[in-house]
Image (cartoon, grey):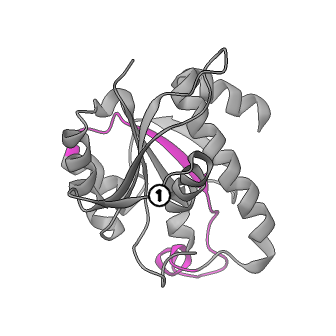
Amino acid sequence: MNDPWLIVGLGNPGARYARNRHNVGRMVIDVLAGRTGVGLCGHRSRARAAEARVGTLPGGAPGPRVVLAEPAGYMNVSGGTVTALVRFYDVDPADRLLIIHDELDLPAHELRLKRGGGEGGHNGLRSISRALGMRDYMRVRVGIGRPPGRQDPADFVLSDFPARERDSLAVTLERAADTVEDVVTRGFEGARQRLRSCC
């Protein structure tokens, strides 16, 4: 029970990409860091990371130990960083690795939990699966919807959330952070059942 969870939010580095749909995983990490009062710092694994306690256990005790992390490199090379973090913190990726990412195949602002399976064309997930040599890690999928008309999906994911979605996005990020807390305090199946029942 003392082994930490590794919580990784996917995205691209730099101000140019900060509010892109593709960066919603990083946005959730920022919410969790704010809740726990930690600041992410540079890590030898080419990530920004911080150790924290997330959620509350029965009786009011602080939640489990976690490492909140954002790869410092671009989305399509996330795998090397995630693998380095897994090794550094001695995390079992099938049991205590949780990846937060954007999902084109879900309606905007819909949340789903998934364990294993394919990557659905997501370059960050593909890089992670390849580097780890397995797909059986847990994911928080944050829906961003499909691009309108004939817009290229690559252009769509690298565009900012529109101003009209600002309020919805804020709610989505908080709900996604709640889901992360549920996974580490209730377990994957308990968190998935709760997510299904409330959303």
Please tell me in which quadrant of the rendered image residue 71 appears.
bottom left
Instruction: Identify the residue at horizontal 36%, vertical 21% (top origin).
Output: 2
Q: Is residue 75 left or right of residue 175?
A: left
The amino acid pointed to by label 1 is Gly
Instruction: Identify the residue at horizontal 53%, vertical 73% (top origin).
Output: 157
Q: Is residue 20 above or below residue 93?
A: below
Query: Which segment is the magenta one?
Result: 132-159
Q: Is residue 94 left or right of residue 102?
A: left
Q: Is residue 191 above or below residue 18?
A: above
Q: Is residue 135 left or right of residue 145?
A: left
Q: Quadrant of the N terminus?
A: top left
Q: Is residue 133 visible?
A: no
- Which residue reaches farthest top? 59
Residue 82, image x, y percentages: 28, 50
Q: Is residue 67 above or below residue 43?
A: above
In front: 147, or 90?
90
Q: Which residue is mark 1?
A: 39
Q: Is residue 97 above or below residue 33?
A: above
Please tell me in which quadrant of the rendered image residue 178 appears.
top right
Instruction: Identify the residue at horizontal 60%, vertical 21% (top origin).
Output: 61
Residue 86, image x, y percentages: 25, 41
Residue 199, image x, y percentages: 77, 39
Residue 101, image x, y percentages: 49, 55
